[in-house]
Amino acid sequence: MLKRPHIFAAGLVVLLTLTFLNLPASTEVRLKHALGGAFLPLFGLTASSRQAAGKIGDTLATRSQLLQENQSLRDENRNLRMQVMQSAEALRENNRLRTLVGWQQKSPWKLKLSRVIARDPANWWRTVQIDLGTRDGMRSNLPVLTTDGLIGRVASVSFDRSQVILLGDPECRAAALVEGNARDFGIIGAAATLDPSLVNLSHLSKDAAIQPGQTVTTSGLGGVFPKGIRIGQIVDSRLVDYGLYTEARVKLSADPGTLEEVWVLFP
Amino acid sequence: MPWGLRNEPGAIASDSLQKAGRVSVINPFNPVLFLLVGFVVVFGEAYCTGLRRVLGAQIDLLPALMVCAGLRAGVTTVTALSVLCGLWFDALSENPLGVSVAPLFIAGLIVCWKNDLILREQTYAQCLLGFLASALVPLGTVLLLLSFERTPLLGWISIWQWIVVSLGGAAATPLLFNLFQWLDRALIYRRAHQTSFRPDRQIRRGRF
C-alpha cells in the first residue's frame, strides 16, 4: 500500500500537471520562457568559453595558414562582388519590368544574424532556441534560414530569445515548388527518419514529373515564407494513397543537425 | 545502511562510508544536490548534440536521476525533482508545459515506494531500474502528448530512439549513483573517530 505522504505527493503532482496543461496558450508561452530563462547564465557561459577557445585557436594558427586563408577569402570576395553586380543588374531589370507591367515592387530581404543557443531535448520535436527576442523586433512566424537555404520559422518569442520550429517538425509545414518545366506544387512536412535533413514533400499531383536532383524552393503560397527560398533537392518519389498523389523525399540544403548560426528574415 | 534513515529526505549517507561505519548519516544537501544535478542534466541535453548526431537520439538522464532520487532520498525530493526538472525540460522543448512531470514522478514514486525491496547497491539492479525508467518515461510522455491531441514526430525511427534512450539510461544510472556517492563523501559531515581510550579506566599492572 502507498503511504500517506506518497498519496499526498501524487495528488499534488496530478493537480499541478492538470493546471499547467490547461493554462491559456499565452500564459504557457510566458511561463516557458520564464522557466527557460534560468538557463541563460549557462548558455552565456558556454558561449563565452567557446569564444575564448576560438581566440586561443586563432593565436595558435601559423602565419602561412593565415596568409593562405586570407588569399582564399580575397578570391571568394572577388567572386561574390561579381555575383552581386550581376544580381543588382538583374534586380534593376526586374524592377523596371515590374513597373512596366504594373506589378508591385519587391522589397529586398532584411536579415538578422542569430546564434543557436539550445536544441529541443525531446526526441519527438525538432526545435532550436535562438538569441534574438522581442527587443530585436522578433515576432512569430518569421522565416529562418541559413546561407544554404530555409530551415524553419519562429514559433514563440520572449524578450531575449525565440523558439524556432525546424523543417521536419510536425508543426512546421511549408508550401514548396519543384523547379522544372512542370513547376509542381507540394507541401513540405515531417519525416521521421534517422537523417534529420530528410523531409517529405507531399500533396504533389499523381502526374508530377519529379526527378531526383530537382531543386525545391518555397512557392510563396501560405503567406509565411516568401517565394524563391531554396529548400533542398529531391531524393526520390513514389505514388501514395492508392496512386492518387505523389510523395517525394527532399534532402534539405541546410543541415538542421549542425546549426550554429541562422538568419531571421524580416519582411 | 540503516533502513529507517532511507525514508527521511536529506538523511542519507554514502554507502561506502556507511559500510566503513565511521560517518554520520546526515546530508542536508541531498535535495539541493538532486535539483542541481537535474538542472545541469536538462541544460546538457539541450546544449550537447554530439550523441544526437552519432546515435540519432538524445539520451535523457532525467529518468535515471529519478531512480537515484527514489532510492537515495524521500518522496519530498522525488516530487520536487520531478516537478522542477519536468518544467525545465518542457520549457526548453516544444512539449506542452507540465507534460513531462507526471511520467517522471511516477518513475520516482514507484522506486521510492518499493525501495526496501530493491538491491540498490548492485550495479545490475541500478542498470535494470534505469533501463525500465528510461523506457517508460518517454512512453508515458508520448501517450500524454497524444491524449492532448499533439502530434509528435513518430515513426520507425522512434523505436531506435527508444532503444537508445533506454540503454543510455541504463548505462547512466550507476554513474549517477557513483556521482552522488562522491558528492556525499565531499559534502557530508563526518563524525570524528572514537578511540578505544577511556580516561576513567585504569590499567593495573602486576608484578611482571
Image: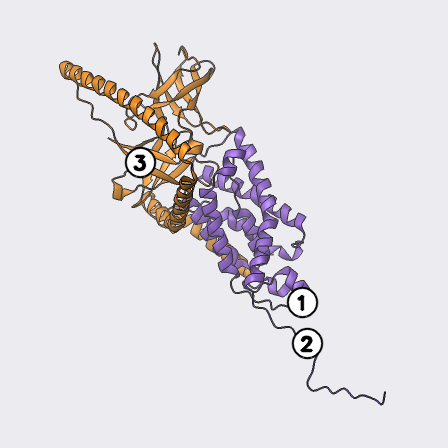
Chain colours: A orange, B purple
Query: Circle 3 sits on which residue?
Result: A113
Q: Estimate how packed mark 1 is, as few (under 14), some (14 to 19) or many (20 or more) residues with alpha carbons within 10 Å.
A: few
- Judge from the rendering whether residue B112 lies leftward or rightward of residue A252; answer left or right: right
Which amino acid is tagged 3?
Leu
Comparing marks 1 and 3, which lies closer to the viewer? 3
Badge 1 and badge 2 both on one subunit? yes
Q: Which chain letter matches label 1?
A: B
Q: Is residue A73 above or below residue B204?
A: above
The residue positioned farthest toward the right in the image shown: B208
Which residue is drawn at the image coordinates 60% and 40% (left, top)?
B167
Which residue is drawn at the image coordinates 54% and 61% (left, top)?
A4
Mark 1 element type: loop
Query: Circle 1 sits on which residue?
Result: B21
For the residues labelled 1 and 3, the Cα–Cα distance comes to 59 Å
- Judge from the rendering whether residue A98 lies leftward or rightward of residue A265; answer left or right: left
- The x and y percentages for residue A192 are 48, 29
